[in-house]
Image: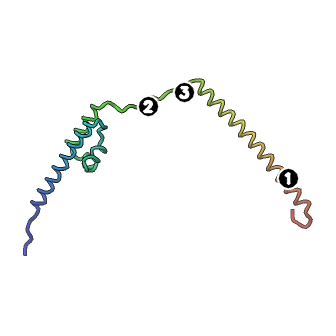
Amino acid sequence: MTRADNSSFLTQANARRHQAALSAAHHAIKQLQRQGQALTFNAVAQSAGVSRGWLYRQDQIRDLISRQRALQPPPARATAQRATADSLRQRLDASRAENTRLRAENRSLREQIARHLGLQRTHAKDTPGEPS
């Protein structure tokens, strides 16, 4: 018993699915442009219901998205401001004050440890029968 050759039907179904995906991608691009949204591969893929990888493999779609993105104005970015000399001086003064505070705290802790160790040694010497 021979099996029927269904490859032509599979090829046709694949071509229809490919055409539907291309159509969905084109529709998504137009829709994103009408809505004034950023035209990115991720946005097109999500809107069209296809994968980003598939979009990148479609030369026609990839070129269209790239051309349209080149025409879009760059997104507004927050302008970086340089720190003024006064603000840098204030930050430096704050750091110096913090250093001074931490040094004093360290000195105090060292003194506490020294007192505690001294008491332990004195206690050990005063206690008869215990090894020192």
Amino acid type indicated by mark 1: Gly
Secondary structure beneath label 2: loop
Residue at horizontal 63%, vertical 28%?
A: 90
Residue 118 image label = 1
Residue at horizontal 84%, vertical 50%?
A: 115
Relative placement, left or right, of 62 versus 122 is: left
Which image quarter: residue 67? Answer: top left
Q: Position of residue 78 (x, y in %)?
A: 44, 31
Q: Which residue is mark 3?
A: 83
Residue neighbourhood size for the residue with mark 2, other residues' Cα within 10 Å, grouped as few (<14), some (14–19), many (≥20): few
Taking the view exactly as shown, the residue that stands out farthest to the bottom is 1
Q: Which residue is mark 2?
A: 78
Report how far apart the C-alphas of labels 1 and 2 lie in the structure.
Answer: 59 Å
Relative placement, left or right, of 24 versus 78 is: left
Q: Position of residue 55 (x, y in %)?
A: 25, 46
Q: First in sequence: mark 1 or mark 2?
A: 2
Which image quarter: residue 26? Answer: top left
Secondary structure beneath label 3: loop
Residue 109 image label = none
Q: Which image quarter holds the N terminus?
A: bottom left
Q: Relative to 80, does residue 62 appear above or below in the rendering?
A: below
Q: Position of residue 98 (x, y in %)?
A: 68, 36
Q: Which image quarter holds the C terminus?
A: bottom right
Residue neighbourhood size for the residue with mark 1, other residues' Cα within 10 Å, grouped as few (<14), some (14–19), many (≥20): few
Q: Residue 7: in sight, yes or no? A: yes
Residue neighbourhood size for the residue with mark 3, other residues' Cα within 10 Å, grouped as few (<14), some (14–19), many (≥20): few
